[in-house]
Structure formats: structure tokens, C-alpha cells
Amino acid sequence: MRRTFAFANAGIGSGKTTFMQRLIVHLHTHHNPPYVLNLDPAVIHVPYEANIDIRDSINYKEVMKQ
């Protein structure tokens, strides 16, 4: 039986990207590839591939102007 879980990671400067990158590597190593969402429209670089990336839909600079 495949286990499913959701994880939300928040907080400025808390190591979110590093934690997520290591969690994703761990899951791939155990042959359980995750479905990854990047919900940070202002992040410049994400060291892992996201299945859904909010940056594809939202230009945070335009939002900040409004």
C-alpha cells in the first residue's frame, strides 16, 4: 500500500529550500518520487524540479507593483 502525505514548509530563512531538496532526494532514493509544488513566486533558484511551479503563473514583480 502506498502512503500519501502532504507537507507544508514555511518561515523566512528557516532552510526550507535545503530541507525540501534533501527530502526529495531521500524519497527518490527510496523509489518513492514525490509530487512537488513550488508555491514561492519570489524564489530565484530551486535546486529540484517541481511538478507545479507558481512562478509559471504569477509574476511577483507585477503583483508587487499593483
Image: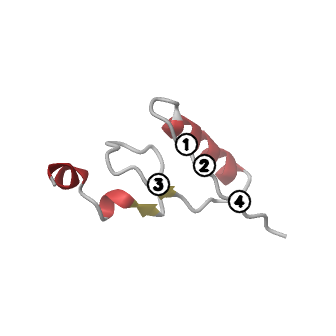
Residue type marked 4? Phe
Residue type marked 3? Glu
**Residue 47: quadrant of the picture:** top left
**Secondary structure under the numbered disc 3 in the rendered image:** loop
Q: In the drawing, what numbered circle is on residue 21? A: 1
Q: Residues within 10 Å of mark 2 (few under 14, many from 20)?
A: some
Q: In the drawing, what numbered circle is on residue 5? A: 4
Q: In the rendered view of the protein, which quadrant contains the N terminus?
A: bottom right
Residue type marked 2? Ile
Q: CA distance from mark 1 to mark 2?
A: 5 Å
Nearer the camera: disc 4 or disc 2: 4
Q: Is residue 52 left or right of residue 42?
A: right
Q: Is residue 48 left or right of residue 28?
A: left
Q: Are marks 1 and 2 in contact (CB under 8 Å)?
A: yes
Q: Residue furthest top?
A: 13
**Residue at the image point whose x is 58% and y is 50% from the top:** 8
Q: In the drawing, what numbered circle is on residue 49? A: 3
Residue type marked 1? Gln
